Image (spheres, rainbow, N blue to C red):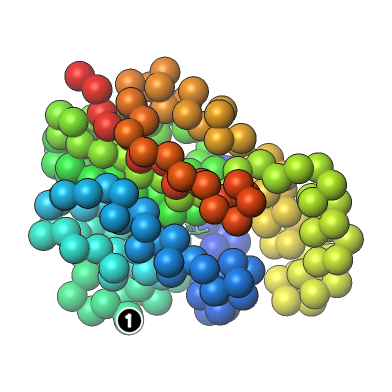
Amino acid sequence: MNNELNERVFSSISGIYDLFLSLATLGQISRWQEELLKCAEAYKNHLDIGTGTGEVLIKSKGGLKVGLDISLEMLKRAKRKESSGNFILADALKLPFKDGSFNLITLSLTYRHLPKREEFLKEAKRVLDVSGKLCLLDIARPPRVLVVLIKALGFLPGVLIFGIEKWRFLISSIEHSQSLDEVLKELKSAGFEPTLVKTKLFSLIFIACSRRSL
Ligand SMILES: C[S@@+](CC[C@H](N)C(=O)[O-])C[C@H]1O[C@@H](n2cnc3c(N)ncnc32)[C@H](O)[C@@H]1O
């Protein structure tokens, strides 16, 4: 994945994104996002990275709430829904915040799209305060047979709805997603200690909250 492609694809599908996501998750996405926030427990300053159309931020009970994305079109949608929201156009790999600014960072369906996760985790650690939390909701790499099925059955509707380039992008992002074990290992080696891990939808979805270690 690279940022330029991410920005182009998400900007161009911003108009149908919410409907697509709701259908693709069988209406479960809203519940999972609520759970992501509950797993974070108490928090005050909340940064939602790859906020898209802002759904996690809208559900957040934070005092200071900031949504960040590289797609302006996604952010425009978010702003329309939550006119008082703080939305920032920026790259997850270069967070425009001072050290220790937040005590919660969330990423819903975004972590697997980041091109240099190691770099991102360093940035996340920097802008979190000591013992701040990083909570991820994402797709775990599905079994090969399921990818083949999605590719076969989804090809025609996928290409008709998104066009061939975007369909390939979406499939590739699923195909190349990490297993939950790989994500947890990556978090640990970047200095995050997992505090709560849950799986959903036959382990195809995970919620992983971790605490910044010193
Ligand atoms: C699948 S969408 C998820 C949107 C939202 N969080 C949700 O749960 O519906 C991924 C979002 O991450 C954003 N994104 C991808 N790479 C990014 C980066 N490097 N920095 C900031 N945002 C990024 C995309 O523009 C897109 O809005």
Question: Which residue sits at x=60%, y=56%?
Answer: 201
To which residue does mark 1 refer? 80
Residue 133 visible, this angle? yes
Q: Quadrant of the N terminus?
A: top right
In the rendered structure, the answer to whether residue 117 lies left or right of residue 46 reads right
Question: Which residue sits at x=47%, y=25%?
Answer: 186
Q: Position of residue 17 (x, y in %)?
A: 54, 72
In the rendered structure, the answer to whether residue 63 lies left or right of residue 191 reads left
In the rendered structure, the answer to whether residue 109 lies left or right of residue 162 reads left
Asked if 95 appears above or below 33 in the picture, the reply is above
Q: Helix, strand or loop at disc 1? A: helix
Q: Position of residue 77 (x, y in %)?
A: 40, 76
Identified by mark 1, the residue type is Arg
Q: Position of residue 159 (x, y in %)?
A: 79, 70
The part of the image, by quadrant, that contains residue 212 is top left
- Of 73 and 57, which appears nearest the observer? 57
Mark 1 neighbour density, 10 Å: few (under 14) some (14–19) many (20 or more)? few
